[in-house]
Image: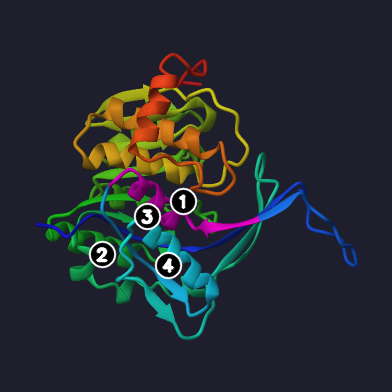
Amino acid sequence: MKKFDAVVVGDVNIDLVVVGYSQVPQPGQEVFVDNMMMHVGGGAALFSLSLAKLGLGVAFNGVLGDDSNGSFIREQFAQYGIDTSQIQTSKTHQTGISIAFNPDTDRSFLSYMGSNQELALERLDIEQIAQGRHVHLTGYRGRENHEQFLAIVKRLKEKGVTLSCDVGWDDSGEWYEGIFELMRHIDVFLMNETEALHYTRRERIADSLAIMADHGSHIVVKLGSDGAVAMKDGVMTRHLAFKVEAVDTTGAGDSFNAGYLYGFIQGFDVETSLKFGNACGAMSVGAYGGSTGTPDLEGLKAFLQRHAGSRILPRAISQ
């Protein structure tokens, strides 16, 4: 028996969300804004909070600073039942911080990585992480850490866990093709549309999915306002987005991941998992903060009942 439903490995920081101003002030300028709010941030942390809200037993594996921000994050995790015993405390860096401007449209960030830079693959405790029946990995950096990342994945598979991975944006701009080797070992491989097109060097998502299906058995691509599509064992399934008013898109993709993987971990089919993912993503954008709007299980069910006939008209998947 596994101790947790899921163990999540990755980044965690403080998000300061600036509301009512979309630019960095000019030198010597002071600007007063409508609001400034502090939330837990970092893709892995937001995913963990969203998954825990849905009722799964979650443990988080990352690094925090020995400071008030680190304490705040631990308290937030504890509030939702997330186990923090795998979190390390940095002796050299403070907890990371991101300042988000213009959260309702194209977000801009000022970020300090802080203690996140100490999360080293070579120091991960495989036995500890394998206490989850499912493990969600983040932090893939292409050629820079491909071999280490792949080795961790193979060792975890030997422990009998299922694995998911969201590789995120490639800051190097290389879009390393070794990712296709990684796909072969991941049970659920997630990315957004732009990332999928970059990695496959294609202009249409249908062509991109066809390429990835030759390497991974279960690929999920988030299409933003067009919903999401999954390719599992060669079968494509699409689910349209729900009509909602967005106020902050921070963490929408991580909330989608939580909804989808909740479905996967609980044994639901692809169509249902996509529905859960789109619903969680839609609820996320309705409140400031990356996980503030994400639902508990009852909230998810209520949302789906309210929005049973509310979908955005689809864009053709081949375009």
| Mark number, residue 80 | 3
Can you name the residue that lies furthest to the right here? 28
The residue type indicated by label 1 comes to Gly
Magenta residues (range)? 37-55
Q: Number of numbered discs present?
A: 4
Decide which of 202, 138 is in the foreground and name it: 138
Q: First in sequence: mark 2 or mark 4?
A: 4
Pointer 3 local density, CA inside 10 Å: few below 14, some 14–19, many at least 20: some
Q: Are marks 2 and 3 in contact (CB under 8 Å)?
A: no
Nearer to us: label 3 or label 1? 3
| Mark number, residue 152 | 2
Residue 315 lies, in percent from the top left, at 51, 19
Left or right relative to 156: residue 24: right
Left or right relative to 163: residue 23: right
Q: CA distance from mark 3 to mark 1?
A: 25 Å
| Residue depicted at x 30% and y 52% | 182
* Vertical comparison of 90 with 78: above or below: below
Mark 4 falls on what kind of element? Answer: helix
Q: Is residue 69 visible?
A: yes
